[in-house]
Image (cartoon, coloured by chain):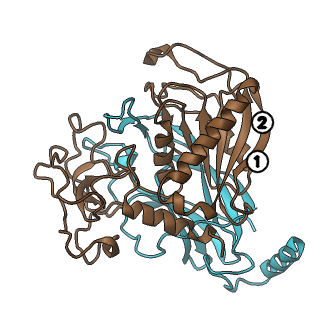
Chain colours: A cyan, B brown
């Protein structure tokens, strides 16, 4: 059964892109996903791996209205640059860290953590229509008391990385 | 050289095939071979606590939980003396250490290694937790929610899951602390992308407008002195959804949906808006 599905999908990929599916709608591909692992070191973000997985994804965040929003998110885009899936993320490339209370009466607080590096994962639907993944992030302030702290970045997010999915 | 080995995976909460459910994975760190039975108990306790928390208590049919048994050569996590720690340097599989960036309670491990192990053991994973076998209080977020065995640490893991799995923002209205903050008086006008904070105080347009009752004033609270956190108690009953000024690390100009929430303080339930977000995200995983 799986083999038949793969064969059908493989055939579809050889034909010119003609949208057949929408994320969230039932389709032969609705439980196919692409797991992307990125590494970050300071502000630099790089793709480390891309792997197909059979799994359902959480419902997409709103596809519209993010033109002036601040924060961090990933999008799956079509060949025509239409957003097909969006996942809003708590900025995984932050240069500060959350510190939790040692006693119940203390609050959570944050501290600068300038040397953070590591990995983060983005999973998007694996559809014929999805061609590219983009990451968007707000830049931190360049002056003032919130200078350089990514958690406090206040400007609308900008595209920081665009990659073509391997088909 | 690995200081331990990956023994395997056990499904400890079974709601169905992993291809069709939301899959959380708990991985052990700093447990020796002889301590794996203890990890099994700790993982089950964590799973029980997670599934008892709203809204997960009503989404049980959508959630699988797995335990990945990884042994370490020695127990615990590194605890450097420069942060007031014991100086312990146990050899552990994921190199977990307190005192990251000089902060003792910042407990961080090699998350790249954790995600690799999890991807191999449960390819369909959505959320990974690293349970560190140490009684010292600590934890951290990111792609892997890391927590120790100190009392209340499960709360850290669930708060971090709010960020990692559901894109929720912090709802506390300060950065380092209400008394020490500088430059946190007023939030920018840019609308945050996260679903549980907003700069919009227009009742008709606010993100969670459908959950605000007509009788609830909007804004529900306003901070009279933006140089500080708002000291006033909630003027409405607990659980009332409205617009409460302060959140996203700023004292003014940004609003949270309830007076309190797990994304603002530990040991609180998720607010109604955060719960709605989680339910919406996990609905595709419920059996049809």
Give the total number of marks visible in the rendering: 2
Can residue A13 be seen at all in this image of the molecule? yes
Image quadrant for the N terminus of chain B? top right
Quadrant assignment, res B3: top right
Which chain does the numbered disc 1 sit on?
A: B
Distance of label 1 from label 2 (alpha carbons): 9 Å
- Which of the two discs, 1 and 2, labels the residue nearer the N terminus? 2
Question: Where does label 1 land, which residue?
Answer: B121
Q: Secondary structure at mark 1?
A: helix
Of residue A81 and residue B172, the one placed in the foreground of this image is: B172
Report whether B217 appears left or right of B124.
Answer: left
Residue with the mark numbered 2: B6
Quarter holding the C terminus of chain B?
bottom right
User: Which residue is drawn at the image coordinates 48% and 60% (left, top)?
Assistant: B55
How far across and down, in percent of the image, does residue B169 sit?
Answer: 40, 54
Q: Position of residue A47 (x, y in %)?
A: 64, 52
Q: Is residue A111 above or below residue B243?
A: above
């Amino acid at each position: 059964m799986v083999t038949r599905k793969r064969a059908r999908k493989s055939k579809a990929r050889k034909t010119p892109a003609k949208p057949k599916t929408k994320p969230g709608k039932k389709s032969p591909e609705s439980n196919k996903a692409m797991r992307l692992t990125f590494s970050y070191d300071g502000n630099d973000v790089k793709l480390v791996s891309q792997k197909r997985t059979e799994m359902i994804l959480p419902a997409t965040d709103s596809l519209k209205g993010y033109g002036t929003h601040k924060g961090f998110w990933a999008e799956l885009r079509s060949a025509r640059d239409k957003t097909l899936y969006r996942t809003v993320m708590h900025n995984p490339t932050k240069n500060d860290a959350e510190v939790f209370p040692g006693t119940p009466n203390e609050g959570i607080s944050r501290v600068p953590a300038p040397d953070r590096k590591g990995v983060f994962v983005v999973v998007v639907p694996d559809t014929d229509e999805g061609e590219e993944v983009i990451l968007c992030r707000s830049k931190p302030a360049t002056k003032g008391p919130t200078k350089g702290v990514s958690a406090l970045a206040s400007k609308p997010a900008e595209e920081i990385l665009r990659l073509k999915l391997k088909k | 050289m690995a200081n331990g080995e990956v023994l395997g995976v056990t499904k400890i909460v079974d709601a169905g095939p992993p291809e069709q459910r939301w899959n959380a994975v708990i991985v052990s760190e700093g447990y020796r071979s002889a301590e794996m039975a203890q990890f099994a108990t700790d993982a089950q306790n964590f799973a029980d606590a997670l599934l008892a928390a709203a809204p997960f208590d009503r989404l049980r049919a959508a959630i699988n939980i797995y335990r990945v048994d990884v042994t370490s050569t020695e127990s615990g996590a590194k605890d450097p003396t420069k942060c007031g720690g014991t100086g312990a340097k146990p050899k552990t599989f994921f190199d977990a250490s307190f005192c990251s960036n000089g902060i003792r309670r910042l407990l961080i491990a090699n998350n790249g290694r954790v995600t690799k192990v999890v991807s191999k053991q449960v390819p369909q994973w959505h959320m990974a937790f690293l349970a560190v076998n140490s009684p010292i209080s600590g934890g951290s977020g990111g792609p892997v929610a890391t927590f120790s065995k100190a009392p209340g640490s499960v709360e850290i893991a669930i708060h971090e899951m709010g960020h990692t799995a559901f894109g929720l923002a912090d709802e506390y209205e300060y950065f380092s602390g209400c008394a020490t903050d500088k430059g946190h008086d007023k939030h920018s006008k840019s609308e945050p992308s996260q679903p549980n904070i907003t700069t919009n105080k227009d009742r008709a347009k606010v993100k969670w407008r459908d959950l605000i009752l007509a009788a609830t004033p909007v804004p529900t609270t306003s901070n009279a002195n933006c140089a500080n956190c708002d000291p006033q108690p909630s003027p409405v009953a607990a659980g009332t959804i409205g617009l409460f000024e302060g959140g996203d690390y700023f004292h003014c100009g940004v609003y949270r949906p309830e007076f309190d929430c797990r994304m603002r303080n530990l040991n609180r339930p998720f607010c109604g808006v955060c719960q709605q977000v989680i339910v919406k995200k996990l609905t595709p995983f419920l059996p049809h």
